[in-house]
Image (cartoon, rainbow, N blue to C red):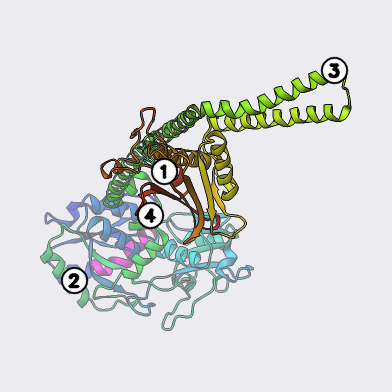
Amino acid sequence: MGSGLLSQPTLASIGQIAPVRIGVLAYKGPELMQEEWQHVRKWLETAIPERPFILLNFDQSGLTRAIHEQAIDFAITSSGHYVALENREGASRIATLESPWAVSPGKSIGSAIVVRNNAPLHTLADLAGKHVMAVEPDAFGGYQIAAGELLRAGVDPERDLSQLQFTGFPVQKILYAVRAGQADAGIIRTCLLEQMVRSGEIGDGELRVLVPIGTQGLRCQTSSRLYPDWPFVVLPQTSAVLSKRIAMALLAMPRTEEGYSWTVPGDYQSVDALFRELKTGPYAYLREWTFEVVLRRYWGWMLLGLALLVGWAVHTVRVEYLVSQRTRALQAAQEEQRRMAEEALMRQVTLDHTARLAILGEMASAIAHELNQPLAAIGNFARGMARRIAAGRLEPVPLLEGTSEIVTQSERAAGIIRNIRAFAQKRSSERKSLDLKPVLLEAVALFSATHPEARVVWETTSTQTSARVIADALQIQQVMMNVLKNALDAQQSAGHAQAPIKLQFCIEAHTYLVTVRDSGCGLAPEQFRHLFEPFFTTKPEGLGLGLSLSKGIIESFGGTLSVKPNGGDSGLTVRIRLPQEELS
Ligand code: ADP
């Protein structure tokens, strides 16, 4: 069947007055359509005598086109087609058909899935992999309702059948094909089978409806739930007065012999829900997730999403930029700090070294004197032994005594040089656990050896055998040498170099306290304020670094170095405190 007009009465046959054009979906073919709907045309002509009425036959797409081109004023069509028209063409309904077989106008149209009586098919799921026929994809009872039921039964008619064949109108040929075994099942509108059996087109018992649903009041068998019956459709351009008169005429139309009549317009919501489920009719776009469809439908959300995305991207880039900038600044600051720390360390090492060399410089004559003694002794022994040998007195005992003395004295000299070399070495500070007492005693010994005029008196109240601290022995010695030298200098300028310099060692408040007390010249309050400033000196040959370096060294081990005038007699006391190892 073509998709255009199927049959058209000429204008001559209906006079000059414009006829009211009613488009009808001729699902069973044009002849049957004219037969089925003539009573409606006749009734309307009786009710509205001043206008002629014509019925125009269409298939579904032809009817849609006619409506679109405003070639008709009203339409009688399937519920499914109507919902699509309502959506796309702005059509509305003015009455719903009441069919004789229906439970009610709202429950009238369904699908029957028809199989041969002896076919081994018993459930909808049995249709998977089978050859199924239907009239056309847009047919409501003739395909769409059944498709919804199949989907709910887990069979997707578009994917799960071996073949889904659309035969086109008239629909009767589907039943003939199923009967002839050309297909396993056919989808038709509910009640069509019963009608054809009644008219003798199909023999009773040849075909059966698959999984008939028992619906009370329905005189036919259905494989699906039921949807509203066909509506009488008015199109947007049609006159409201005419529509109202036709609506009233339809409602007043007496029931036909077959039992058809018209009632108030029904609710087609369930049809709409089915279309949504099938993603067809007005919801066909749900299948077409093309970029354009998505864009058209969700452009608002997409725009918002895009804006958020752009905002987020800008934010991220900005944050990353800031982070990288700050990181760079931080790295530069860290690098600068590291460089400064390195420089400070180098300066400290150089200063320490200079200070030690200065001390050594001051000690030079004392060192020479100290070395002189073993060298003189070695000389004496060597000369004595030479005399003995010359005189022929070769007894081994005195000769051995002599050589052993030479060895002892040379070791003493080597020891002095070793100490001095270690002291003069340029090196950075090292920290390790050490016993403070022997380090102090060694410093006193070195100082006394190099300053014979000094009299250092060692006093201790501590009975503790060891006094462990975390420090650098060489640096502690450097501090002690410096402090003792200052004490000696001060006593020398006071005119009593030989007076005792008291070195005390005790434990006080979890620290080891070392005090060096002299009876020297002391310091004027004005000078006292500058005591720890680098290069502050009152001595002609002084560097003024000793005390400031000593304070730095002791503080680097977590301790303190302070100086205070002696109460009563003259002189100063230097107090050095170092934390006990377990507390540091
Ligand atoms: P220097 O001994 O090279 O001058 P110091 O930093 O060791 O450098 O001492 C700085 C100054 O502090 C000394 O010049 C001296 O005036 C003063 N001073 C240090 N110790 C004493 C002390 N025990 N008695 C008096 N004055 C002292």
Q: What is the distance, in whole Å, between disc 2 and disc 3 at their CAs? A: 165 Å
Dot 2 beta carbon under 8 Å from ligand 1 = no
Name the kind of residue labelled 4 in the image: Leu
Q: Residue 223: x percent and y percent?
A: 49, 72
Q: Sequence-wise, which precedes: disc 3 or disc 1?
A: 3
Q: How many C-alpha atoms fall within 10 Å of the one at disc 4: few (<14), some, or many (≥20)?
A: some
Residue nearest the observer in this picture, 345 or 155: 345
Is residue 241 left or right of 145 when viewed as pictured? left
Residue nearest the observer in this picture, 470 or 342: 470
The residue beneath circle 2 is: 247
Q: Residue 70: x percent and y percent?
A: 20, 52
Q: What is the distance, in whole Å, between disc 2 and disc 1 at their CAs? A: 113 Å
Q: What is the distance, in whole Å, between disc 4 and disc 3 at their CAs? A: 132 Å
The residue beneath circle 1 is: 551
Q: How many C-alpha atoms fall within 10 Å of the one at disc 3: few (<14), some, or many (≥20)?
A: few
**Disc number lying in front (4 or 3):** 3
Q: Residue 121: x percent and y percent?
A: 61, 68
Q: Sequence-wise, which precedes: disc 2 or disc 3?
A: 2
Residue 286's label in the rendered image is 4
The magenta segment: 29-41
Residue 385's label in the rendered image is none
Name the kind of residue labelled 2 in the image: Ala
Q: How many marks?
A: 4
Q: Sequence-wise, which precedes: disc 1 or disc 4?
A: 4
